[in-house]
């Protein structure tokens, strides 16, 4: 297994490159609490936190899930939902 060290000065550029390729979620200070939410700029990140108000697992596992959609009636149809398959990065865990 390889390991890499990222210098602190290069962190903003690294985050900007990630945002260009993925949906990036990071700890952000919001109303005096830290939560994980999507960021558009590396300056939004707050790495000076001890615990977030809500766990970041809700970014991976939604609280509800649609199993199927259907149209009732004699010519009813059952359809599979379209899933969000967008690649995500959770930064700062």
Image (spheres, grey):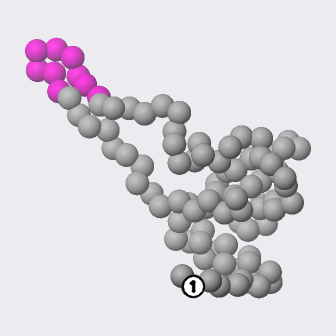
Residue topped by disc 1:
2
Quarter holding the C terminus is bottom right
Check disc 1 and report its element: helix, strand or loop: loop
Name the residue: 77% across, 61% down. 44
Q: Is residue 19 above or below residue 49?
A: below
**Residue 18 sits inside the magenta stretch:** no
The answer to whether 33 is drawn above or below residue 16 in the figure is above
Q: Is residue 73 magenta?
A: yes
Residue at 89% over, 44% down: 32
Q: Position of residue 83 (x, y in %)?
A: 37, 46
Judged left or right of residue 70, residue 54 is: right
Quarter of the rendering occupied by the N terminus: bottom right
- Badge 1: few (under 14), some or many (20 or more) residues near its Cα, within 10 Å? few
In the picture as drawn, the residue positioned furthest to the front comes out as 1
Q: Which residues are magenta?
A: 69-77
Please state the horizontal and vertical placement of residue 68, each as a whole percent of the image. Answer: 29, 31
Residue 4 lies in quadrant? bottom right
Q: Residue furthest left?
A: 74
């Amino acid at each position: 297994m390889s390991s890499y060290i990222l210098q602190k000065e290069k962190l903003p550029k690294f985050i900007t490159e990630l945002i260009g390729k993925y949906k990036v979620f990071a700890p952000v200070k919001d109303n005096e609490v830290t939560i994980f939410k999507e960021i558009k700029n590396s300056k939004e990140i707050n790495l000076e936190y001890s615990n977030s108000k809500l766990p970041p697992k809700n970014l991976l596992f939604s609280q509800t899930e649609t199993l199927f959609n259907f149209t009732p009636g004699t010519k009813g149809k059952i359809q599979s939902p379209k899933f969000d398959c967008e690649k995500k990065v959770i930064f700062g865990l």
